[in-house]
Image (tube, rainbow, N blue to C red):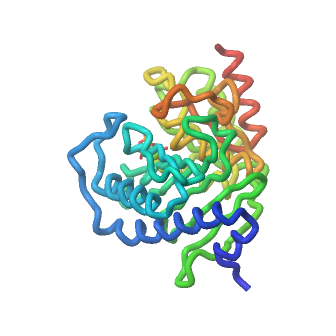
């Protein structure tokens, strides 16, 4: 019989199960509201990026609902300039990218929600994550959550989220590479590394959505990168709300991450808006890349 998300969560702590379940309900709402929340909001976020109506709505919706849940103490969001205090009695601290890949909204390509769940106060390194999850609003809405040693995926159906696969591991060898930023701005050693991947038959698939691009690495194996660029040494992705969460999920699926020097999860954050070059994927690919990038420095 098909297991529902609720049944699957019987394995984890009650509070964590309630939180993940709550987030799954919010994801359902977000998915059904997306057709009606289109266009630009005429405001910019703390990163100077123009916000969309959907970005702002999803952010406020999740914040309001999590506040009501009483489970969350503080929250760091891509759309908020400071740490948001929710409920003093809450036991979790959350990182949130409410609508990742929002530049894909106009063209109806993939977008998602990324959530990191901590007990320690934020900011803290990604290795302290208790659980991490994302929801992908694709042709079907899927939810992936990871706890220590386990990654499971659920599909949204009329019966709610039902299990598609548990104990997901990255396929070996991987098949894909998925890399953001202008190729002419990649550093020479990275360019060479990618040329080698191409020579080995790795296929390019980049969708401009961290959730979508990570999800395909989870299913087909390979490497995703938003790398160091000659114009942006720290790349684009945000350590707290984006890179740590996905690095944790990929690690629990047997993969690895690096910022070019060490695992993304080991980085001691300096602030909540820090960006970081992000490379995640099969362990062998990340280890080889890290050696090359360290040598070239
Ligand atoms: P966003 O959260 O504002 O959408 O920005 C993050 C997104 C990621 O989903 C994706 O990996 C990257 O930005 C795509 O950037 P680019 O448009 O430069 O390819
Ligand atoms: Mg984002």
**Residue 54 versus residue 43 in the image, above or below:** below
Q: Residue furthest left?
A: 42
Q: From where the camera sits, is residue 212 visible?
A: no
Estimate the x, y position of residue 211 in percent, counting from the top left: 53, 53
Number of marks in picture: 0
Looking at the figure, which quarter contains the C terminus? top right
- Please indicate whether residue 232 sits to the left or right of residue 134 in the image: left
| Occupied quadrant, residue 111 | bottom left
Q: Residue furthest front?
A: 89
Looking at the figure, which quarter contains the N terminus? bottom right
Q: Residue at x 77, y 61 (%)?
A: 167
**Residue 27 versus residue 266 in the image, above or below:** below
- Please indicate whether residue 129 sits to the left or right of residue 167 in the image: left
Q: Residue at x 51, y 71 (%)?
A: 140
Q: Residue at x 49, y 37 (%)?
A: 237
Q: Nearer the viewer, residue 98 or 250?
A: 98
Q: Nearer the viewer, residue 121 or 254?
A: 121
Estimate the x, y position of residue 191 in percent, counting from the top left: 59, 27
Q: Residue at x 44, y 46 (%)?
A: 85
| Occupied quadrant, residue 2 | bottom right
Q: Nearer the viewer, residue 196 or 38?
A: 38
Estimate the x, y position of residue 144 in percent, counting from the top left: 62, 61
**Residue 195 versus residue 13 in the image, above or below:** above
Estimate the x, y position of residue 168 in percent, counting from the top left: 74, 60
Q: Quadrant of ligand 1?
A: top left
**Residue 103 versus residue 68 in the image, above or below:** above
| Occupied quadrant, residue 142 | bottom right
Q: From where the camera sits, is residue 6 visible?
A: yes
């Amino acid at each position: 019989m098909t297991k529902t998300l609720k049944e699957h969560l019987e394995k984890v702590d009650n509070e964590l199960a309630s939180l993940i379940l709550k987030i799954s309900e919010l994801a359902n709402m977000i998915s059904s509201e997306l057709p009606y929340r289109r266009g630009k909001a005429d405001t910019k976020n703390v990163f100077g990026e123009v916000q969309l109506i959907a970005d702002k709505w999803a952010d406020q919706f999740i914040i309001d609902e999590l506040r009501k849940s009483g489970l969350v103490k503080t929250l760091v969001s891509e759309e908020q300039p400071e740490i948001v205090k929710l409920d003093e009695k809450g036991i979790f601290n959350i990182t949130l990218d409410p609508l990742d890949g929002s530049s894909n909204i106009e063209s109806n390509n993939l977008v998602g929600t990324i959530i990191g769940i901590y007990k320690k106060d934020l900011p803290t390194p990604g290795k302290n994550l208790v659980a991490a999850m994302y929801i992908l609003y694709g042709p079907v809405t899927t939810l992936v959550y990871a706890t220590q040693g386990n990654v499971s995926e659920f599909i949204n159906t009329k019966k709610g989220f039902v299990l598609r696969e548990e104990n997901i591991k990255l396929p070996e060898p991987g098949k894909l590479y998925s890399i953001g930023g202008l190729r002419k701005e990649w550093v020479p050693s990275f360019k060479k590394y990618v040329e080698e991947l191409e020579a080995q038959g790795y296929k390019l698939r980049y969708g401009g959505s961290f959730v979508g691009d990570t999800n395909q690495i989870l299913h087909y194996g390979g490497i995703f990168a938003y790398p160091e660029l000659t114009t942006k040494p720290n790349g684009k992705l945000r350590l707290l709300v984006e890179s740590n969460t996905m690095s944790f999920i990929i690690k629990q699926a047997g993969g690895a991450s690096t910022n070019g020097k060490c695992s993304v999860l080991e980085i001691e954050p300096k602030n909540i808006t820090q960006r970081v070059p992000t490379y995640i994927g099969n362990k062998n690919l990340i280890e080889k890349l890290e050696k090359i990038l360290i040598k070239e420095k």
